[in-house]
Image (cartoon, grey):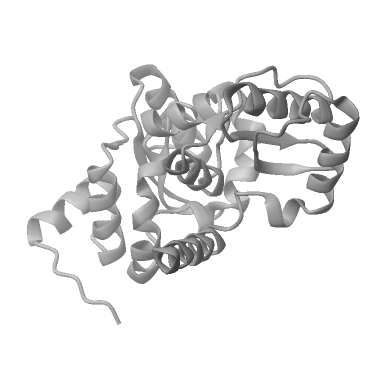
Amino acid sequence: MTEENFSTRERVDALKTYGSPSDEVCYASRRLQKIGAVPFNGREDGLSKDVYSRAIKQAKENNEMVAVYLSSGEVQGLFLVTPGHTSPDLIDSDWHEFTKNADNNRWDKPIEEQKKEEPLDRFSVYEYGKKLYEKWEVFSKEEQYAAERLERMGVEPYVGKMNGNVSDIFWNAMKQAKAENNKVGVKLRSGVINGLFVVGPEPMADDKEYAALRFEQYVENQQKFRYDKPIAMQKAEEKQLNSLDTCRE
């Protein structure tokens, strides 16, 4: 069992701010402070859905991340709302999805679980997440982690149009890789392929028929080729590659 030392002041602040002095809330509060989240400062009366909507409004109006504690029969826990969150106008449709994933998204999980999640807290920072999204079109933590890996590898993001047939997007990424003589990371989304992939510079990249064959290879092997696998798998792949690099040295 994990034991943490929280001062009386921390517990009092957690109680005043979030309505609970528990170890889990105190630890989550520390994490939220580190990433620059501010407590919800609006009215806490009414349904949790109403409080959630007010937290979204605060985040958007002040361009800040907001930590809010919700407590009702439907949902309970400490949550983070960012400026890029859904619009308050769409709260009715979003609320069902939010409550369905509440246990997974709450910050005040058992402390051992929090410690496992803590190394990825940077992805909850709105400005950082926005930067990665604008550059790589990534949103989930798996995609964001993969984007960081690609940056460390020197891979360039795809800069072409994202609308149209996914095979044409793939072809354009191949042509970009050849023109820049560098690997290119591209997010592909369709009924046949989904994920963040890397294409390298190939001499025949301008040939549409060749590009179509390469695309089919990616479709058939997408689970192997995609970079946005579960983070544990990504870390295992990184460790394996680092071991190979060490052996080569």
* Residue placed most toward the observer, 132 or 26: 132
Q: Is residue 70 above or below residue 206?
A: below
Residue 244 located left or right of residue 110: right
* Residue that appears at 48% across and 66% down: 244
Quadrant including the C terminus? bottom left
* Residue that appears at 75% across and 19% down: 163
Percent position of residue 129, x then y: 44, 34
Q: Residue furthest bottom?
A: 1
Question: Quarter-wise, where is residue 177 in the image?
Answer: top right
Percent position of residue 240, x then y: 50, 66
Quadrant including the N terminus? bottom left
* Residue placed most toward the observer, 180 or 92: 180
Percent position of residue 48, x then y: 48, 42
Percent position of residue 16, x then y: 20, 47
Q: Residue furthest right?
A: 209
Q: Is residue 159 above or below residue 118?
A: above
